Image: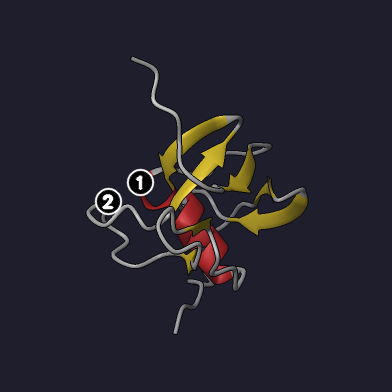
Amino acid sequence: MVSLIDDIEGQITFLFEGQPVTARPGDTVASALAAANTRHLRDSVVSGEPRGVFCMMGACFDCLVEIDGVQNRQACMTPVADGISVKRQRGGVEVAL
């Protein structure tokens, strides 16, 4: 069960799929979304099944999202910032060579 620590001051607001999400300074995108009860962060490239936060330490890549138009960002390794726009990552990602 995810819960917030109540004695941290400050508030950050960012958008997830166009909807405002409130976070606290020091949160990662993944921790803020988990606290907001958002579990579906991307779709599996193979099966299309929803994927979300799993390891919270950058090892599994299940939390890949698009942040400010940049795909393949690990939500668990990205600090949340005021005003960023986060979207679910859909399908495969094209890699520039």
Question: Residue 82's image quarter?
Answer: top right
Give the residue at mark 2: 58
**Is residue 33 shown above or below 71?**
below
Q: Nearer the viewer, residue 27 or 62?
A: 62
Dot 2 or dot 1, earlier in sequence: 2
Question: Residue at the location (64% across, 52% down)?
Answer: 11
Label 2, residues with CA under 10 Å away: few <14, some 14-19, many ≥20:
some
Q: Nearer the viewer, residue 2 or 39?
A: 39
Q: Is residue 28 left or right of residue 77?
A: right
Residue 21, image x, y percentages: 69, 56
Q: Is residue 26 visible?
A: no
Looking at the rendered structure, the number of numbered marks drawn on it comes to 2
Q: Of the numbered discs in the image, which one, if any, rests on residue 43? A: none
Give the residue at mark 1: 77
Q: Nearer the viewer, residue 21 or 60?
A: 60
* The furthest residue to the bottom: 1
Marks 2 and 1 close (CB-CB < 8 Å): yes
